[in-house]
Image (cartoon, coloured by chain):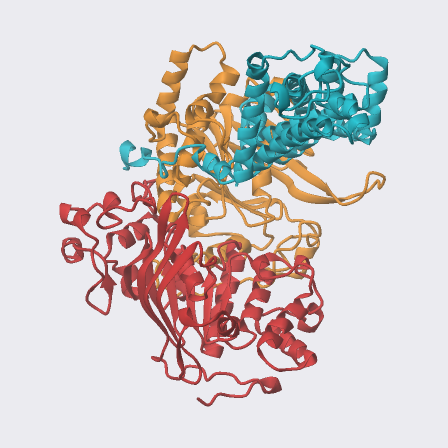
Chain colours: A orange, B cyan, C red
Amino acid sequence: MTEAIMTATVAEEPPLVEARRLRQWFPVGGSLLQRRREMVRAVDEVSFTIARGEVLGLVGESGSGKSTLGRALLRMTDLTDGQILFEGRDITRLGRNALRPIRPRMQFIFQDPFASLNPRMTVRQIVGAPLAIQRPDLGIAARDARIAEALQTVGLSMQYADRYPHEFSGGQRQRICIARALIMEPSFLVADEPVSALDVSIQAQIVNLLIDVRRKLSIAMLFISHDLAVVGHLCDRVAVMYLGRIVEIAPTRELFRRPRHPYTEALFSAVPVPDPTVRRSRVILRGDIPSPLAPPSGCAFRSRCPYVLPECAEAVPSLREVDGGHRTRCIRDDLVLGRPHGGLS
Amino acid sequence: MPTASALAQPAVAVKIGSGAWRRFCRHRLALFGVAAILLMVLASIVGPSLIPFDSLKIDIRHRFAPPPFEGHLFGTDQLGRDLLVRLLMAGRISLSIGFAAMTVSTAFGTLIGVAAGYYGGAVRVALMRFVDAMLCFPQIFLLLVLAAFIQPNVVTLTLIIAASSWMEVARVVEGQVRSLRERDFILAAEMLGASGRYVMFRELLPNAIGPIIVAATLTVARAILLEAYVSFLGYGIQPPMASWGNMLNNAQQYLGSAPWLAIFPGLMITLAVSSFNFVGDGLRDALDARFDLN
Amino acid sequence: MQGTLGPVGFAMPAAAHAATETVLDVQDLSVTFATENGPLVAVREVSFDLRAGETLALVGESGSGKSVTSLAIMRLTPSASRVKVSGSVQFTDGEGRKRDLLQLDLDAMRRVRGNEISMIFQEPMTSLNPVHRIGDQIAEAVTFHQRVSARAALVRAAELLDQVGISDARRRLSAYPHQLSGGMRQRVMIAMALACNPRVLIADEPTTALDVTVQAQILELLKELQTATGMAVIFVTHNLGVVAEIADRVMVMYAGAIVERGDVVPVMTRPLMPYTQGLLHSVPRLDPDAPGREPLEAIPGNVPDPLQPPPGCAFAPRCRHVEPACEAAVPVLEQADDGRQVRCRRWRAIDEAQR
């Protein structure tokens, strides 16, 4: 009954990160006295692996649970159910003290660079904080050397180390965040919409930085985004989430060439393309995303799916393999879903 | 690829604190308050040595001298003691108690507030209900009861006043810390493996400084007033030592015949309390926008 | 101008009539903010015209002045003590009367807002009062400008909800904003904006905060509504994909000034201004066959500090093709070929080199 865990593409080597049937449910409403409260199934039965140095993209809209998943993976919250293995070790129930030595190896990049920096600390203090916490034995000279190195990796000069966050632009602040994440040489990075809050021209800079960092330091990443184009540019594999479940997961090229789930098709179709000469036939979904409190029975997407069948309401479809490494949660085998980019030649 | 130098230029080169300072300076009452406080502090420290009269020296021949006759700028009281020098000596007491009580209550209140705001849950509920319970005590009665049991001197009075003033600070700090608790930068610190103490004192506290300073300033005003109350009622500083409060008490019987005995101490209390309140208001306006994290 | 009569006797403007008629003529619009650190010029002598029935996209990043431009047209910038607005905005209404919106007194402007010119925003809750039902709020938009009974206004409100694609319109009239999803709230805001059949709709990033599938729905809706009512639309956005989807003409803004303007196809397929070129190259494309994980062509540097603008061309510090003349003086908006305008000294040379 356990879902087949997808093994790492690199043969023999155990995956760096392994998620097994993760569940993150949040209670909603109800009072202290009321026993049964409604549960929002923010993340429901999610399993995947990430190999060393691999970048997995996580795509979805509001209510998909992608942010919750990213945070749960790094143990920012306590999981309702399931297991997380990091470097082969089960970290699901570890307490704060047990996690502390592991923390430097798995880091998080927040969406809002304005909010993720302490406004009362200088760049030096911010980027040096991991060292202050984890390596209090390091002398000032050694610490400054590592701070300078981290800043250089992200393209910032040490001469601005004594400035405060509000003196920098959004893109620069995000660089500071990345420097802080990298200074302890992590093997895994979870980036939660790291470029969404930035201007378009700056997004490209930061995406390039991440590509560069990934190549130089072989860091594995979980790249969470709602922007399919950015994900396609940066990631090796992509997982698409809808209402707390992964509905499709495949290597990037496969997913983009031939999606196997109607939601993925709709997502591609909805993304506006900066080329006015392309006229595509669009799949416009009807209706809104259902409330996570009351997802439709069976396949959660059936209320908006253009290809829905009566069978879709019966049971939650399982994530089945259709091709090498390509899995989908749609019961229909017969669909030929549109090329996402009809006009592209 | 973008060059390091092209990226490294900070977007806005604005000096920190310049905005807050300028905002404070626009607050004319606050500036007046600062000036008045400085004057009072200076006068009470240096003044008594410049005045030829001693605060305790009794001189019956010159009792009830109205100001500014016979060399007594503010007149004398019923025992012929110079009022001005007594006022300044009293100022030393009242201001010292004010600052000391502020320090103790702010320190204690901040600790409680930070802990309550950071830990949340049962800890927060317990601590804040304790704060609420303490706030329920009518302050004056609490003070009087405590003062009745304890030998009233500067130290004990300071502690008693601090004991009834820390709650406001705790409330303010707890509110601020609670709103900061879920901010991304706090989560980021926890993701680095920071301990509770690190997060509370290195990350949260520096961001709550603004409201703490404001609360502290207003606490001084309160403390001075409370000391005056208690001394006025006879349970505070005991004569012959001068305190603005007990000078007022003393002056009660002579309101008709020697009104200056009451006017001057009253004015000093009003001036001191108002000045600190003005400064507190000015700081609140100046620091609010400056420490706005949005 | 004869139009058709819609239901309940409301006059509807004739669609696609007088397609080249100018509805808005903005001349030298400038907006300066008085800040603690000196005057901040947010919009620098922006001039453009908006024709009936067309969609003009205003594209730019932060600091470009695109939002402030749209707010200034609506006279929604902060009060006069902190903001100086100069220039003229000539609005031609349904009867052919021309008025300068910047010269109108506040009462007259209020009669224009929501009536002849409407605006929708990124966050629908800026227009929706959380304690009133949406039906009442839409009806209020009607009764504020037109002498109709409350009942008639509610009927119109139901019509509008229907028009914006909200099913079960009559029942929805009694819903509160918090009971609706983000996409539906945005539709309600559009319904309110359309209540009095405006000639012009100004949309300030209306889909930025929406999920991509919902964004697609809203863009479709806006296109349909525009075709049905013939109104002109100014669409402010930073998303180039959205521009390609809906715009007829596009205006690119940088550091408060227009740097390129023209029909959408030439501007986006063959941009002349280096900034536009940089923008288009830095946007990742949905291309499955792109080789490897190649870096994007990013524009280096940052948007200039509005308090200390560069002496010459505002884009010079970041431009690949910069030469000393560019930094000496601000280039003027020149006429390029095929009806376009570019603010670049070297556009011809750059274009030649890239052919």
Q: Is residue C178 above or below residue B233?
A: below
Q: Nearer the viewer, residue C18 or A269?
A: C18
Measured as percent of width and height from the top left, residue C257 is found at: 30, 57
**Residue C128: which quarter of the image?**
bottom right
Q: Nearer the viewer, residue B60 or C229?
A: B60
Q: Is residue C130 above or below residue B133?
A: below
Measured as percent of width and height from the top left, residue A213 is found at: 37, 30
Q: Nearer the viewer, residue A43 or A307?
A: A43
State left or right for residue A261 relative to residue C61.
right
Q: Is residue C174 above or below residue B51?
A: below
Q: Is residue B51 above or below residue A317?
A: above
Measured as percent of width and height from the top left, residue A68 is found at: 60, 39
Q: Residue furthest bottom?
A: C2
Residue found at x 40% / y 84% = C96
Measured as percent of width and height from the top left, residue B244 is found at: 71, 23
State left or right for residue A228 relative to residue B64.
left
| Residue B24 visible in image | yes
**Residue B11: which quarter of the image?**
top left
